[in-house]
Image (tube, rainbow, N blue to C red):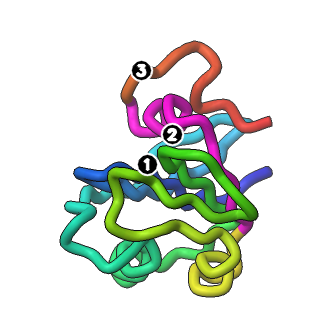
């Protein structure tokens, strides 16, 4: 895999969204923005805002969202809005969306980085 990946660490207080370049199987941050989650109507609104400033083509997307996924949807107790993978896929340039374990999303942004974080399989 090569190209840019759109990734996000979604939380009740703040949401971080970034573009990461895949080079030789490793992720390198190219743009990262922070948003106050409660100031936005949903993740799709945050993605639109981010993409208006960073509109480069991407090869995929991945978001860490707290809470269980049921039929591609997460209703996190600390968010005022749900996250729906199918709806986001249609709104976010038809990216491939995956839920990741919360600490892995944080690792992309330099929180709790370990020896395996930042590697693309």
Identify the residue at horizontal 45%, vertical 46% (top origin): 29
Q: Nearer the viewer, residue 22 or 43?
A: 43
Q: What distance separates the C-alpha of mark 1 from that of mark 2?
A: 5 Å
Identify the residue at horizontal 25%, vertical 56% (top origin): 34
Quarter of image, res 94: bottom right
**Magenta stretch bounds:** 96-110
Q: Position of residue 109 (x, y in %)?
A: 40, 38
Residue 102 vs 14, above or below: the answer is above
Q: Which residue is mark 2?
A: 105
Quarter of image, res 79: bottom left
| Disc 2 element | helix
Q: Position of residue 93 (x, y in %)?
A: 63, 82
In contact (CB < 8 Å): disc 1 and disc 2:
yes
Question: Which numbered disc covers residue 9?
Answer: 1
Is residue 119 visible to the viewer in this orientation of the structure? yes
Is residue 54 visible to the viewer in this orientation of the structure? no
């Amino acid at each position: 895999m090569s190209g840019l990946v759109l990734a996000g660490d979604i939380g009740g207080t703040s949401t971080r969204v970034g573009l990461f370049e895949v080079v030789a199987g490793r992720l390198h941050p190219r743009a990262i923005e922070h948003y106050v989650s409660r100031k936005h109507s949903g993740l799709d609104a945050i993605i639109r805002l981010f993409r208006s400033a960073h509109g480069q083509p991407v090869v995929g997307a991945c978001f860490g969202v707290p809470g269980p996924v049921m039929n591609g949807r997460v209703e996190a107790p600390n968010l005022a809005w749900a996250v729906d993978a199918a709806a986001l896929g249609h709104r976010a340039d038809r990216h491939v969306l995956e839920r990741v374990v919360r600490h892995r999303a944080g690792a992309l942004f330099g929180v709790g980085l370990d020896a395996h974080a930042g590697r693309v399989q």
